[in-house]
Image (cartoon, rainbow, N blue to C red):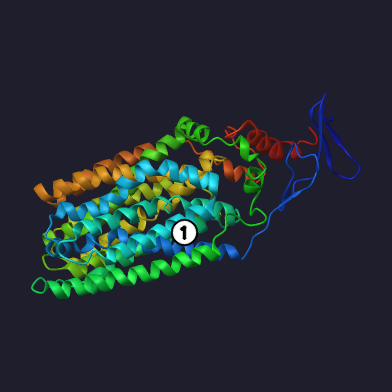
């Protein structure tokens, strides 16, 4: 029999009465390319379309994210050289890295608010522009007594990264289709990772240790700074011409549903409250913070760990860091492709977390064997899984918090990563100084083990995937407004219930 409220029409569409007294809506059969939202009185189908411009947007963002990451790590990998040039302690050089994390925490909320209110383009311009400005200020910091100038420049760059780190999932969701969104997010994160890799590789080559000739050392540092400034300026200009807020038509049903929500109904405060009420997301926040904070700490202190056991090996330290990150880049892309094919977010996250823990343990207990080839291998294994985890966490967060803003969820994930990064870097740095690298690394291993437990407790509810597949997940999505909730519910559920 036919259930009350549903009536099959002769043209094959379905007549649905949402409110028997006041509201009737006609919906066509579900289609891969279009979806009809309740409440639209013009009965026009929402189209989805993919644009070639999405690849240019992704490329430009990835490149200026690369330069920002390069500027983060360019001091730490040659800590001993900058200590000698500026005549400061290792803690002072560590702070050139830690300031990136410190700046992120208080600024992430205004940054994500700006992303939601002003859009992708404005946020991207701020990120690329501040990145270029910081690079040029560094050019004025070449001089043994100008450490405060280089610190000021690094603070500007750290503000820039607040407008960069939260964008991968937003770019992927707004510009890319459901079958490529995880790969796109992984590629966007890849740019940042590649910047870290180049930051490990180039500074030891461009600025060799010429302790007996500070003028030559300063000349080499200026070459690195001016080169960075030139590239970052070019990328800022490309950002102006390439990056737009969103394509004319949405790339997926999930974006089509969200785009119908009235802008005036959106509440940033309510979105934040909804996220902190989401228990699976809270667990992900802490576990993501532990893993990413551990990566930040290892990256910052790599020079000190390696030089302790292998004095004079600054160049190989950079190469080990390069191996760490390049392996992670492959891990990121493979994990992104895997997620697009399988949508097994929790299982993949848990497996990668466990393998990262194993990699950290192996790296810890092989660091003092006296064989650099072993360190290259163990660092590669560690990087493959630890760095490969980053885009997985982003995408898992978007899935379990849909339809909340991708920028907000990613921003909070990064904020927790920075908090844990600050804590881990300072504590591990002190442990490394006082007791050696082994103590500091064991400290990280214990925390990563805790992260495994927290990850296992996360309830997997793939809400965005459910919308894209036009099906209902267990536990309906809690939206940022009742309007969005009704849109998701009605556009997914009602068209399929034509008969019982």
Residue shown at 11% from the left, 50% from the top: 433
Q: Nearer the viewer, residue 73 or 132?
A: 132
Residue 441 lies left or right of residue 327; in this view the side is left
In the rendered image, the quadrant that contains the C terminus is top right
Query: Does residue 184 appear in the picture of this structure?
Result: yes
Q: Is residue 397 visible?
A: no
Residue at horizontal 45%, vertical 67%? 235
- Is 418 located above or below residue 239 in the figure? above
What secondary structure is marked by label 1? Answer: helix
From the viewer's perspective, tell me whether residue 439 is left or right of residue 392.
left
Which percent across, then down, holds residue 300? 24, 55
Q: Name which quarter of the figure residue 136 lies in.
A: bottom left
Q: Position of residue 232 (x, y in %)?
A: 39, 66
Q: Quadrant of residue 471?
A: top right
Residue 473: quadrant of the picture: top right
Q: Looking at the image, which is closer to me, 146 or 326? A: 146
Q: Left or right of 278: which side holds 479?
A: right
Q: To which residue does mark 1 refer? A: 188
**Residue 178: image location, x then y, percent:** 60, 53
- 238 in relation to 1, above or below: below
- Quarter in which the N terminus is drawn: top right
């Amino acid at each position: 029999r036919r259930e009350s409220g549903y009536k099959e029409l002769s043209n094959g569409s379905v007549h649905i009465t949402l409110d028997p007294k006041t509201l009737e809506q006609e919906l066509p059969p579900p289609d891969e390319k279009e979806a009809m939202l309740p409440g639209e009185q013009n009965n026009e189908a929402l189209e989805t379309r993919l644009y070639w411009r999405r690849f240019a947007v992704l490329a430009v963002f990835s490149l200026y994210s690369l330069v920002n990451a390069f500027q983060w790590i360019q001091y730490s990998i040659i800590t001993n050289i900058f200590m000698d040039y500026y005549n400061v302690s290792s803690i002072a050089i560590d702070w050139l890295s830690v300031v990136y994390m410190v700046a992120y925490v208080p600024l992430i909320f205004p940054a994500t608010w700006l992303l939601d209110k002003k859009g992708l383009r404005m946020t991207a311009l701020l990120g690329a522009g501040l990145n270029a400005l910081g690079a040029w200020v560094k050019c004025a910091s070449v001089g043994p007594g100008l450490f405060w100038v280089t610190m000021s420049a690094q603070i500007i760059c750290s503000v820039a990264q607040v407008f960069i780190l939260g964008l991968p999932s937003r770019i992927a969701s707004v510009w890319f289709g459901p079958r490529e969104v995880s790969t796109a997010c992984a590629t966007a994160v890849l740019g940042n990772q590649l910047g870290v890799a180049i930051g490990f590789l180039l500074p030891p080559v461009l600025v060799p240790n010429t302790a007996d000739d500070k003028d030559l050392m300063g000349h080499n540092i200026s070459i690195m700074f001016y080169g960075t400034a030139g590239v970052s300026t070019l990328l800022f200009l490309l950002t102006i011409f390439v990056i737009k807020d969103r394509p004319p038509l949405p790339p997926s049903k999930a974006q089509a549903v969200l785009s119908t929500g009235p802008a005036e109904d959106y509440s940033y405060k309510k979105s934040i409250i909804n996220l902190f009420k989401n228990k699976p997301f809270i667990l992900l926040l802490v576990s993501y913070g532990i893993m990413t904070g551990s990566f930040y700490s290892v990256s910052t202190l790599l020079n000190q760990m390696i030089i302790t056991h292998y004095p004079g090996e600054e160049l190989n330290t950079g190469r080990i860091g390069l191996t760490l990150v390049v392996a992670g880049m492959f891990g990121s892309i493979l994990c992104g492709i895997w997620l697009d094919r399988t949508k097994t977010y929790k299982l993949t996250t848990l497996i990668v977390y466990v393998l990262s823990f194993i990699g950290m343990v192996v790296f810890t207990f092989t660091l003092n064997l006296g064989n650099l080839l072993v360190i290259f291998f163990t660092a590669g294994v560690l990087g493959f899984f630890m760095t490969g985890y980053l885009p997985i966490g982003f995408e898992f967060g978007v899935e379990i918090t849909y339809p909340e803003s991708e920028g907000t969820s990613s921003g909070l994930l990064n904020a927790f990563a920075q908090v844990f990064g600050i804590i881990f870097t300072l504590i591990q740095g002190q442990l490394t100084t006082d007791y050696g690298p082994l103590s500091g690394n064991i400290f990280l291993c214990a925390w990563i083990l805790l992260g495994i437990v927290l990850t296992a407790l996360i309830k997997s509810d793939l809400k965005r995937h459910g919308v894209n597949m036009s099906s209902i997940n267990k536990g309906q999505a809690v939206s940022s407004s009742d309007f969005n909730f009704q849109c998701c519910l009605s556009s997914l559920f009602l068209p399929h219930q034509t008969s019982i």
